[in-house]
Image: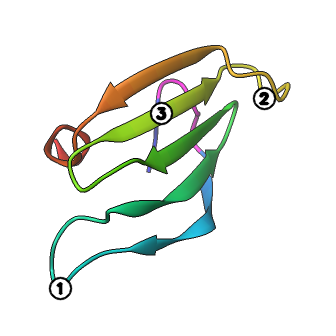
Amino acid sequence: MKSDFLGDNMDYETIVPLQATDNQDPESGEILVTGGGTVRIVIESGASVRLEIDVDGDGTVDDYQYATWPALRG
């Protein structure tokens, strides 16, 4: 996988286990994606996902964005 923001090499780690009912989108949990910077994906509900973006990987969140699962899936 490649990202203009995170670069060619990305890793991910489940910080808080994902919880989902049946085959639905996750309702809670956290995933940390790292590369040139980091994006913490915080699942707020089955419909809402918060992205905490650290552009330079210094540990400080530079931007918050909100999305839905369909938007993240493309």
Dot 3 or dot 2: first in sequence order is 3
Q: Residue at x 42, y 22 (%)?
A: 65
Which residue is tagged 3?
A: 51
Distance from disc 1 to disc 3, alpha carbons, whole Å, reads: 24 Å
Q: Residue at x 69, y 30 (%)?
A: 37
Mark 2, Cα crowd under 10 Å, few <14 / some 14-19 / many 20+, is some
**Residue 6 included in the magenta stretch of the image:** yes
Mark 1, Cα crowd under 10 Å, few <14 / some 14-19 / many 20+, is few
Residue 49 visible here: yes
Residue 51: give x, y in percent of width and height: 47, 33
Q: Residue at x 58, y 42 (%)?
A: 40
Residue type at mark 1: give it: Asp
Magenta span of residues: 4-8
Which residue is tagged 2?
A: 57
Helix, strand or loop at mark 3: strand
The one of 52 and 20 positioned closer to us in this rendering: 20
Q: In the image, which is nearer the foreground, mark 3 or mark 2?
A: 3
